[in-house]
Amino acid sequence: MGIIGLVAAVGILASACVAMPSDSSWGDVSLLGDPPKILLAFSDRVVQVDPTDGSPVELRDANGNVRTDDQGNPRTWLVQSPSGTTVHYYSRPVQTDPQTLTVAAYENKLYQIDLSSANILSADGINLPGHVVGNPLLTDKFLYVPLSDAGLVALDPKSFAQKWQFTGDDGKGVWAQPLLSQDGSTLYVPTMNHKLFAIDAQTGTEKWNVDLDGAVASTPVFANGALYVGSFGRKVFKVTTDGTIAASFDTSDWVWGAPAVVDNMVYAADLSGYVYALEDDGSSFKQVWSRQVAQGAIRMTPLVSGDTIVVGSRDQNVYWISRQTGDALNDSSGKPIIRQMQGEVLSNILLIPPSGSITEPMIIVSTIAKQEELVAFTLATGERRWAYNGS
């Protein structure tokens, strides 16, 4: 399935709401280095952005001097498609050694990036047996790459030789990063064929699977000794580590993002714009509150910090709500804290704690609009601090 086919497939999956734009995709935002820089993988590029002011990170040589182009202009840390090709990045790069990032492209490829020069080391890349839209998982022994149409492949993290491939019972795709158990023995693999699989992390041999009534497009969350996961079956599940459904809760629409779990509370969102607060009593979920926060789909995992929950939506807004009641949080003038964006918000929000010149917690919101790929807000009040324009 080509990139147009993927967009069409996502449009079908999102048909309970509004069709996905045919000229856009989602990206991924993470942190890299110390002091940390924001790493954005989106569309045909990977960039580093300074979290203090949203400026592109300058490219420097080993002596700390800013590198310049042929005209003497400062160069920034930017990686685009390999020469002569166009590729699409949906997932975050992983740092496979101190000087190298490895990024998966949708087009059946892995590319290695030299951190110091921001150059792709080989335009030919490393071939993969399927397309990639989910985040790879790196361990000491393996690089696990989810394939959107062919299961999961385990590679040697140094040579990238394929060790094994897991395709489940019908070869359906994996759209999310697998989860490694705390003891490193088991991978929990969410699939688009309605099943959550547990497989041996060393060999790929299946241990068990459980049907979750719909496609699973997000990574399970391990908490309280169990796995929490949402599905397109309009449900949130608690699954034991031996594959038994311990509790479930019916939502209004498909649950794309993973739940957020804090102590015995589970917070989830669905594609009708609802956010749910569920109390886990061990064998069932008790609804504490639910609220239709947005008019568009909420695809992301709710960001929970203190008494604040922040969610972004396909209606191009970001909402601040109370963790205790689900009601809108208000600014100093008494107005609800809602921030309008220039594009749909599809990816998870990144929380940046105070450090150095960042004096209070900030959140980083990414959109599918290239004129506003990243926006920083204060967590407490929703004050807009900066925006990064990637166009």
Image (cartoon, helix red, strand yellow):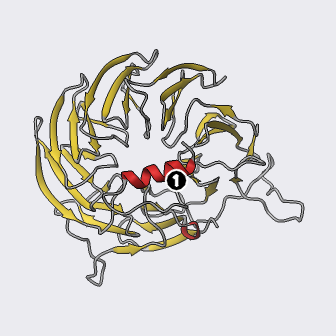
Residue positioned 18% across, 43% down in the render: 264
Residue positioned 44% across, 37% down in the render: 177
Q: Does 282 sit left or right of 44 as displayed?
A: left
Q: Does 239 sit left or right of 359 as displayed?
A: left
Numbered disc 1: secondary structure: loop
125 vs 251: above or below? above
184 vs 380: above or below? above
Where is residue 191? Give x, y as percent. 37, 35
- Give neighbour class at mark 1: few <14, some 14-19, many 20+ (Cα, 10 Å): many
Which residue occupies the foreground of this view, 106 or 305? 106
Farthest residue in the bottom direction?
A: 333
Q: Is residue 30 visible?
A: no
Where is residue 24? Give x, y as percent. 53, 60
Amino acid, disc 1: Gly
Residue positioned 48% across, 38% down in the render: 148
The quarter in which the N terminus is drawn is top right
Where is residue 2? Give x, y as percent. 57, 45
Q: Tell me the quarter of the picture where residue 183 sits.
A: top left
Residue that carries the numbered disc 1 in the rendered image: 27
Residue positioned 33% across, 40% down in the render: 216
Where is residue 71? Give x, y as percent. 89, 65
The quarter in which the C terminus is drawn is bottom right
Which residue occupies the foreground of this view, 384 or 192? 192
31 vs 379: above or below? above
Q: Tell me the quarter of the picture where residue 303 sits.
A: bottom left
Farthest residue in the right direction?
A: 70
